Image: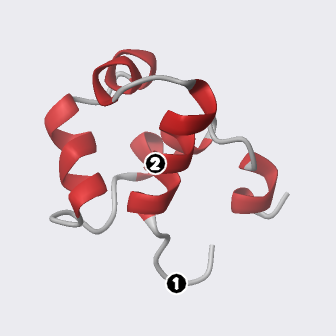
Amino acid sequence: MEGLMDWKRIIEEVLEYREINQAELAHKTGISTVHIHTLKTGKRKEPGFSKGLAIINLHPNRNELLKI
């Protein structure tokens, strides 16, 4: 993964694709709603590896994001 990922965009795409809200994303990933909110608003630039992977695993273009 080159450079910083656009977590705001990634989270928005996951929410839209899965038709869920931030609370449901938090439940599915085991990440707090506060952590997801801070990523979505840009207050936090990067999640930890396992948290980022949990979000990416729900993304419609998972393989592209991971460059698999």
Identify the residue at horizontal 52%, vertical 84% (top origin): 3
Q: Is residue 4 above or below residue 24?
A: below
Identify the residue at horizontal 18%, vertical 52% (top origin): 38
Return the x and y of residue 30 as percentages of the image width and height: 35, 22
Q: Is residue 8 above or below residue 62?
A: below
Mark 1 residue element: loop
Spatial CA distance of label 1 from label 2 is 19 Å
Residue 54 visible? The answer is: no
Depth check, mark 1 against mark 2: the one in front is 2
Give the color scheme: rainbow, by chain, secondary structure or one colour: secondary structure
Residue 67 visible? The answer is: yes
Return the x and y of residue 14 as percentages of the image width and height: 55, 40
Return the x and y of residue 58 as percentages of the image width and height: 61, 33
Q: Residue furthest bottom?
A: 3
Q: Neighbour class for label 2 at 10 Å: few (<14), some, many (≥20)? A: some
**Residue type, numbered disc 2:** Glu
Check disc 2 and report the residue beneath it: 12
Could you tell which of marks 1 and 2 lies nearer the N-terminus?
1
In the picture, measured across the screen, residue 2 lies left or right of residue 7, that is right
Check disc 1 and report the residue beneath it: 3
Identify the residue at horizontal 27%, vertical 55% (top origin): 39
In the picture, measured across the screen, residue 37 lies left or right of residue 3, that is left
Q: Is residue 29 above or below residue 47?
A: above
Mark 2 residue element: helix
Image quadrant containing the N terminus: bottom right
Picture mark count: 2
**Residue type, numbered disc 1:** Gly
